[in-house]
Image (cartoon, rainbow, N blue to C red):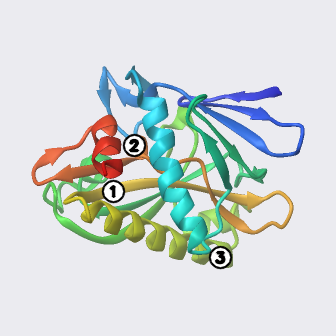
């Protein structure tokens, strides 16, 4: 097993059968010891965060696979906190796609002159470039096409799937009395078929979920969602 990449919250290994193995860590993104799913730096370490993230990811990905949504998910090993995935290539050096249902986080910081905190948003989708040095800048559809990162046709697929997946996650949370404020997804191309796939994870580490006015931490979210 060959270590290919050491990431903020996961390490990536190449398996002999052509698949890849993601090892989930207890590191989460944020700043100054405060968790923030939209941050581009590791802000703190939470014991058990890796396994909690994997368990939720496995839960959501299994359901999405059953519904025919293209993902890279193959299976998970909870004892080792690892997930086996199909090989996929990213767009450029990687993109993050955010779907926002409430005005919070970086959206509020940017547009606070025009919106109130917590204001409803209509499944607002925005794409950012994974670039730590430039603080993951947002990028438009036209710029993505001009820079040969995504065609307009691929952007349309990306946007549609982002909304569909985000609404699915929101509906699952609603069953537990939770509200999804925003979620960050990643996509890539299947290395064998070139089909656009959902990749990375869906967990408390890349979304903001609330119960009433109370923000739900990633470990608590996993407990609430997977409780019998």
Closer-to-camera residue (87/136): 87
Q: Position of residue 221 (x, y in %)?
A: 30, 44
Residue 61 visible in the picture? yes
Residue 78: image x %, image y %? Answer: 55, 35
Give SS at disc 1. strand
Mark 1 sits on what residue? Answer: 182
Circle 3 sits in a helix, a strand or a loop, which is it? helix
Q: Tell me which label, 2 or 1, sits earlier in the chain.
A: 2
Residue that label 2 marks: 38
Query: 10 Å neighbourhood of mark 2: few (<14), some, or many (≥20)?
Result: many
State the residue at coordinates (54%, 72%).
161
Residues at marks 3 and 2, CA–CA distance in whole angstroms: 25 Å
State which tag comes first along the sequence, 3 or 2: 2
Who is closer to the viewer here, 123 or 175?
Answer: 175
From this view, report whether residue 112 is shown above or below residue 169: above
Closer to the eye: label 2 or 1: 1
The quarter in which the N terminus is drawn is top right
């Amino acid at each position: 097993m060959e270590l290919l990449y050491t990431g903020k919250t996961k390490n990536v290994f190449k398996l002999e059968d052509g698949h890849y193995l993601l090892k989930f860590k207890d590191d989460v993104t944020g700043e100054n010891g405060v968790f923030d799913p939209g941050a581009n730096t590791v802000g703190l370490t939470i014991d058990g965060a890796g396994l909690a993230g994997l368990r939720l990811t496995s839960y959501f990905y299994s359901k999405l696979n059953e519904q025919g949504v293209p993902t890279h998910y193959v299976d998970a090993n909870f004892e080792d906190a690892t997930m086996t995935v199909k090989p996929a290539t990213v767009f450029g050096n990687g993109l993050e796609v955010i779907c926002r249902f409430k005005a919070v986080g970086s959206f509020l910081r940017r547009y606070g002159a025009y919106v109130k905190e917590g204001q409803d948003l209509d499944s607002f989708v925005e794409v950012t470039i994974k670039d730590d040095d430039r603080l993951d800048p947002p990028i438009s559809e036209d710029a993505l096409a001009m820079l040969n990162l995504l065609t307009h046709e691929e952007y349309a697929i990306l946007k549609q799937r982002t909304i569909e997946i985000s609404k699915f996650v929101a509906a699952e949370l609603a069953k537990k009395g939770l509200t999804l404020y925003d979620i960050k997804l990643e996509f890539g191309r299947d290395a064998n078929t070139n089909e656009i796939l959902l990749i990375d994870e869906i967990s408390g580490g890349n979304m903001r979920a609330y119960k009433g006015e109370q923000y739900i931490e990633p470990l608590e979210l996993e407990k609430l969602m997977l409780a019998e």
